[in-house]
Amino acid sequence: MTGSRITCYNLRSLTQKSDAVGGLIMKGWLIEAVGTASGILTTAAYIPGVIKVWKAKPAPALAVSGLQYVTVSIGIFGWLIYGIMLHSRPIIIANAVTLVLALSILLYKHIYG
């Protein structure tokens, strides 16, 4: 691929101005809106499970094991660090809240399970 030029864009540059991505023009507000909506949806998906676990004593048998929740929590923590490194508010907020919810299930399972 001699003569071809590959340009990489970081998230910060995309949110500060319009850039061509895959043939589409994406403005900063659109990127933030997609990130925010995605964060709200994925975080909201945890809430019914957390409420169900909190209401039941002892903790009900979960569809996933404690090890899986630990693994998911580590992954969420990684996304949180990634968001901090990018200075991306939607990634930071969504993953901080989701991490608290996932860890609360683990804590509850440890105490009451």
Image (cartoon, rainbow, N blue to C red):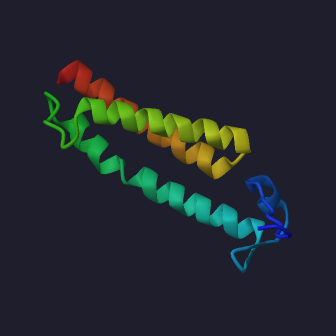
The image position of residue 70, as x and y in percent, is 36, 30
- Please report the residue visible at 37 percent of the width from the left and 34 percent of the height from the top: 71
- Please report the residue visible at 69 percent of the width from the left and 70 percent of the height from the top: 30
The image position of residue 10, as x and y in percent, is 76, 54
The image position of residue 91, as x and y in percent, is 60, 48
- Please report the residue visible at 30 percent of the width from the left and 41 percent of the height from the top: 50
- Please report the residue visible at 29 percent of the width from the left and 50 percent of the height from the top: 48
The number of numbered discs placed on residues in the rendered structure image is: 0
- Furthest residue in direction bottom, as rendered: 23
- Furthest residue in direction top, as rendered: 111
Quadrant including the C terminus:
top left
Considering depth in this image, is 91 or 4 the residue closer to the camera?
A: 4
In the visual, does 98 lie left or right of 60?
right
In the visual, does 4 lie left or right of 36?
right
Considering depth in this image, is 3 or 62 the residue closer to the camera?
A: 3
In the visual, does 11 lie left or right of 76?
right
Quadrant including the N terminus:
bottom right
Considering depth in this image, is 39 or 70 the residue closer to the camera?
A: 70
Q: Residue 25 appears in which quarter of the rendering?
A: bottom right
- Furthest residue in direction front, as rendered: 2
In the visual, does 111 lie left or right of 102?
left
Q: Residue 32 appears in which quarter of the rendering?
A: bottom right
